Image: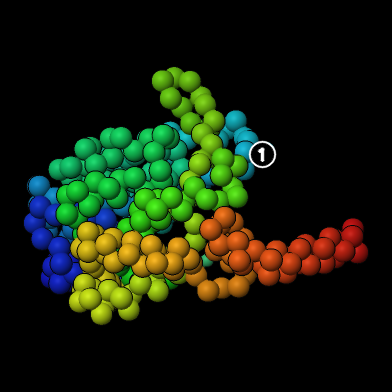
């Protein structure tokens, strides 16, 4: 059943696939949802296939560096049950990127992640997914964590991801050649809640495939086709992937390419901060 669902999403033997999932949405699987999903993927993709996931780890403010926080490839990822299960899978490979690493299992895991280190942008491995004519699926997180990661790649290629007021302000210690160094992140993916705005475009172009994986509503797409569409839309309007929430700091407050939203956001935020200060004084 699970494998049929994955086939309906467009996956086939030998594919390279980026998977994002809210595995709990698959239904009652006695806590084995992530394992069942990975087993199903690997069986369908076969010995020539590769499954990729996001295994992000915390970025800390550079003004509050904690020498106890040193990233290594064994640092647990903070991106949910699927990433954790993939990272502990026998033969799994992880990026060397200290905050926005990927994890991969399968034939091309090593080639796809080998050069993803602290010198590369967060979503750099997506270039390899495009080169391999790969696919992407979302399992159970279509609404809760919407969108495909090719949008982040398009943002990187268009020079948007480095246009943040937080450039270089967040990072983590990491170990390299036996030395501990500070990694200051120069690009950031930002909020992705607005990526659902591309869904109607995918449907209109006939690109989107849907299936149930267990009880989880799921979607799949070819990475190259998705990227082309997303990039074209971002070229017309660089703010096309931002969400609509007025209070979203990640969309309204940080991007140098979206300064039109700064006055309203920061005026409201400034008032809130002053109010909080007075509230704190009254309590104190
Ligand atoms: Zn947002």
Of residues 111 and 263, the one nearer the viewer is 263
> Which of the 4 quarters of the picture holds residue 281?
bottom right
Q: Picture coordinates of residue 11 (x, y %)?
A: 15, 63
Quadrant where the C terminus sits is bottom right
Q: Residues within 10 Å of mark 1 (few under 14, many from 20)?
A: few
- From the viewer's perspective, tell me whether residue 163 is left or right of residue 234: right
Render colour scheme = rainbow
Residue 89 visible in the shown view: no
- From the viewer's perspective, tell me whether residue 83 is left or right of residue 172: left
Q: Is residue 272 above or below residue 257?
A: below
Quadrant where the N terminus sits is bottom left
Q: Picture coordinates of residue 117 (x, y %)?
A: 38, 35
Residue corresponding to mark 1: 64
Which residue is pictured at 52% across the width and 50% down the height?
163
Q: Is residue 31 above or below residue 115?
A: below
> Which of the 4 quarters of the picture holds residue 61?
top right
Which residue is pictured at 46% across the width and 27% down the height?
175
Q: Picture coordinates of residue 130 (x, y %)?
A: 22, 52
Which residue is pictured at 58% across the width and 32% down the height?
68
Q: Picture coordinates of residue 86 (x, y %)?
A: 30, 49
> Which of the 4 quarters of the picture holds residue 197?
bottom left
């Amino acid at each position: 059943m699970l494998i049929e669902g994955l086939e309906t999403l467009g996956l086939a033997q030998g594919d390279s696939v980026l998977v994002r999932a809210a595995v709990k949405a698959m239904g009652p699987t006695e806590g084995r949802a992530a394992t069942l999903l990975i087993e199903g993927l690997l069986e369908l993709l076969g010995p020539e296939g590769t499954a990729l996931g996001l295994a992000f780890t915390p970025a800390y403010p550079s003004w509050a560096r904690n020498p106890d926080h040193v990233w290594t490839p064994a640092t647990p990822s903070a991106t949910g049950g699927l990433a954790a299960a993939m990272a502990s899978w026998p033969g799994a490979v992880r990026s060397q990127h200290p905050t926005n690493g990927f994890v991969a299992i399968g034939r091309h895991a090593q080639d796809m992640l080998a050069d993803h280190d602290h010198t590369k942008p967060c979503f750099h491995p997506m270039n390899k997914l495009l080169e391999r004519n790969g696919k992407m699926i979302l399992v159970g997180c279509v609404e809760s964590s919407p969108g495909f990661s090719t949008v982040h790649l398009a943002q990187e290629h268009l020079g948007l991801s480095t246009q943040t007021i937080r450039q270089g302000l967040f990072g983590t210690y990491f170990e390299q050649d036996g030395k501990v160094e500070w990694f200051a992140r120069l690009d950031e993916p930002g909020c992705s809640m607005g990526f659902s705005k591309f869904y109607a475009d995918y449907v209109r172009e006939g690109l989107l495939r849907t299936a149930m994986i267990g009880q989880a509503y799921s979607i799949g797409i070819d990475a190259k086709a998705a990227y082309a569409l997303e990039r074209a839309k971002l070229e017309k309007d660089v703010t096309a992937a931002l969400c609509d929430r007025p209070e979203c700091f990640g969309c309204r407050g940080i991007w140098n390419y979206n300064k039109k939203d700064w006055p309203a956001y920061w005026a409201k935020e400034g008032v809130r901060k002053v109010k909080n200060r007075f509230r704190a004084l009254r309590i104190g």
